[in-house]
């Protein structure tokens, strides 16, 4: 589904990520994990085309999209649910969902909204509420539903659990599992390493802009080095 | 009483044109947080283009109005492309855009002067048939009714477009958060260009109506309304379309009422701008303005 080769992103003279190589297979959930500031969000933003790529290439379904503009990437099925959710606070829940389907034929929108309200029942209750007055967890669900409205081939989730209460975090990961069981391909960026490995098939550990470790998610969570560095366990 | 009634009616028409003009400022400001100071020059160009179409091309005002409005919209695209797009990535884009839009205004004004001469011109007699009604001592002309109908029609269309149409929702999304809009698949640069088109078309339409109402056009006719338009959007709340409409009406009414009460037009602008200070003291964000929260 996604092939990334030698991806380098620089802010001025500082390289935020350097020579990243990774891939996401169709129907799998892949995690990029690592500490704050490792370059995970930068990587997703490069995939979405909102930060320029200094070197390397990005291919979606075998086609190079490195120079494709950000809105065309969404049309091609590469959709990001950003960190901090970025819901449109002044617009209603329904309008946010409609804008998620901006690149889709309008006759499919009503049906897709109904599907989203089934997956996230809270959104049905708050249809006409301004998105800005939702709680953090509700905003995260709205952001995910809005991303799904684009019918992504590849869904990029950036820190979906950030700043949420433990119970809500659990719900968010349940939804990721549910999406996975429906066959949705997902690239997940998380600081919550333990939970994200639990829902992933494969994972890459990013540190200081480079991949330092990769492997099947269950192998990584059993790896004593990973456990020590990221899972807060002393082995 | 009739004098007062007459002035209220006049204030409504003038205020309606102020609203139409100011909505153009507020649209661009709402989306980009930037003032397009070429707006008044586009207002002038709209009026003069309609005059040319009527006088030299022999079109009726009904054909000239939409054509000149479209032309003003195209000038808006040009202003965006020349004065704003090249500066968008600069850290001082707000200030440099302000200056480069003034430069565009000066260029437009000079071109207008070259083409139409530096004197006042007017639509040929009979462009709009002169029909006058007297209702209880208040005089209303067909032209006034047509102007008000046009203003209302354009405002309702704009409001519905922003509320319901796909492009209207995209404009609101870009206004709220450009990054979020980009990630939703919205062509942000295209939406910004369209906003300039819309804003300038409305400004051009206001210029045509203004030229018809005051029966006078000139290359510098945009100057007095430029500051009034800015005052109107501050009055109504920066970036708020209904605020600009209300602000325009309030401004127009305050002008004519001052004339009616004081008996002279000397204090007209002084009172209108004093009202601006009063509103800013009482409601710093304007009549309908909200405290805008910007992302860091």
Image (cartoon, helix red, strand yellow):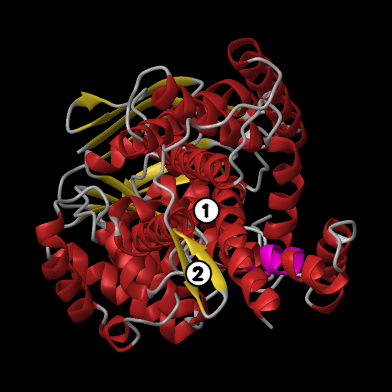
Residue B121, image x, y percentages: 61, 26
Residue B290, image x, y percentages: 65, 71
Kindly tell me whether residue B136 is visible in this rendering: yes
At label 2, counting other C-alpha atoms closer than 10 Å, the crowd grade (few under 14, some 14-19, many 20 or more) is some
Point out the stretch of residues depicted in magenta: B249-255
Q: Do marks 1 and 2 share a chain?
A: no
Question: In the displayed structure, would residue B84 be above or below residue B163?
Answer: above
Q: Is residue B211 magenta?
A: no
Which residue of the protein is positioned furthest toward the top in this rendering?
B114
SS assignment for the magenta stretch, majority: helix
Q: On residue A89, which mark appears?
A: 2
The quarter holding residue B7 reads bottom right
Left or right of B61 on screen, residue A52: right
Q: CA distance from mark 1 to mark 2?
A: 11 Å
Left or right of A205 on screen, residue B283: right
Kindly tell me whether residue A212 is visible in this rendering: no
Which residue of the protein is positioned furthest toward the bottom in this rendering?
A125
Question: Which residue lies under the disc numbered 1?
Answer: B175
At 37% across and 59% down in the image, what residue appears? B153
Left or right of B246 on screen, residue A104: left
Residue A146, image x, y percentages: 31, 63
Q: Is residue B254 magenta?
A: yes
Question: In the displayed structure, would residue A187 be above or below residue A230?
Answer: above
Number of numbered discs on residues: 2
Tell which of B220 and B265 is nearer to you.
Answer: B265
Secondary structure of the residue carrying tag 2 is loop
Residue B103, image x, y percentages: 72, 22
- Quadrant where the image shows the N terminus of chain A: top left
């Amino acid at each position: 589904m996604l092939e990334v080769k030698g991806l380098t992103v620089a802010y001025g003279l500082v390289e935020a990520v350097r020579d990243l190589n990774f891939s996401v297979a169709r129907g799998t959930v892949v995690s990029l994990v690592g500490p704050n500031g490792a370059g995970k969000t930068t990587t997703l933003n490069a995939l979405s085309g909102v930060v320029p790529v200094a070197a390397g290439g990005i291919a979606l379904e075998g086609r190079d999209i490195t120079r494709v503009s950000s809105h065309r990437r969404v049309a091609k099925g590469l959709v990001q649910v950003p960190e901090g959710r970025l819901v449109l606070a002044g617009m209603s829940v329904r309008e946010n969902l409609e804008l998620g389907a901006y690149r889709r034929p309008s006759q499919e929108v009503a049906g897709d909204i109904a599907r989203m309200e089934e997956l996230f029942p809270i959104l049905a209750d708050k249809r006409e509420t301004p998105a800005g007055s939702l709680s953090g967890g509700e905003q995260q669900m709205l952001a995910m539903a809005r991303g799904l409205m684009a019918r992504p081939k590849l869904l990029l989730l950036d820190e979906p659990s950030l700043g949420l209460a433990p119970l809500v975090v659990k719900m968010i990961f349940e939804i990721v599992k549910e999406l996975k069981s429906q066959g949705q391909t997902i690239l997940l960026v998380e600081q919550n390493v333990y939970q994200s490995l639990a829902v992933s098939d494969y994972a890459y550990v990013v540190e200081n802009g480079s991949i330092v470790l990769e492997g099947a998610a269950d192998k990584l969570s059993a790896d004593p080095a990973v456990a020590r560095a990221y899972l807060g366990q002393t082995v | 009483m009739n004098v007062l009634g007459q002035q209220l009616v006049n204030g409504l028409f003038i205020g309606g044109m102020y609203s139409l003009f100011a909505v153009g400022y507020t649209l661009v400001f709402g989306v980009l947080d930037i003032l397009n100071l070429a707006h008044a020059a586009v207002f002038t160009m709209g009026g003069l283009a309609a005059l040319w179409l009527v006088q030299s091309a022999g079109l009726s005002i009904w054909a000239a109005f939409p054509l000149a409005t479209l032309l003003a919209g195209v000038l808006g695209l040009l202003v965006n492309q020349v004065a704003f797009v090249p500066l968008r990535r600069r850290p001082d884009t707000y200030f440099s855009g302000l200056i480069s839009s003034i430069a565009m205004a000066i260029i437009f004004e000079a071109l207008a002067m070259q083409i139409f001469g530096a004197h006042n011109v007017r639509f040929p007699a009979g462009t709009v048939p002169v029909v006058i009604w007297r209702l209880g001592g208040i005089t209303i002309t067909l032209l006034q009714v047509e102007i008000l109908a046009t203003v209302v029609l354009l405002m309702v269309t704009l409001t519905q477009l922003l509320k319901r149409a796909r492009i209207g929702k995209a404009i609101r999304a870009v206004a709220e958060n450009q990054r979020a809009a980009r990630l939703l698949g919205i062509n942000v640069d295209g939406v910004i260009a369209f906003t300039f088109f819309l804003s300038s078309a409305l400004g051009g339409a206001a210029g045509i109506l203004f030229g018809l109402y005051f029966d006078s056009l000139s290359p510098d006719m945009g100057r007095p309304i430029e500051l009034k338009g800015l005052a109107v959007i501050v009055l109504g709340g920066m970036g708020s379309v209904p605020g600009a409409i209300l602000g325009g009406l309030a401004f127009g009414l305050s002008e004519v009422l001052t004339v009616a009460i004081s008996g002279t037009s000397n204090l007209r602008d002084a009172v209108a701008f004093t009202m601006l200070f009063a509103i800013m003291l009482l409601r710093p964000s304007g009549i309908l303005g909200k405290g805008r929260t910007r992302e860091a």
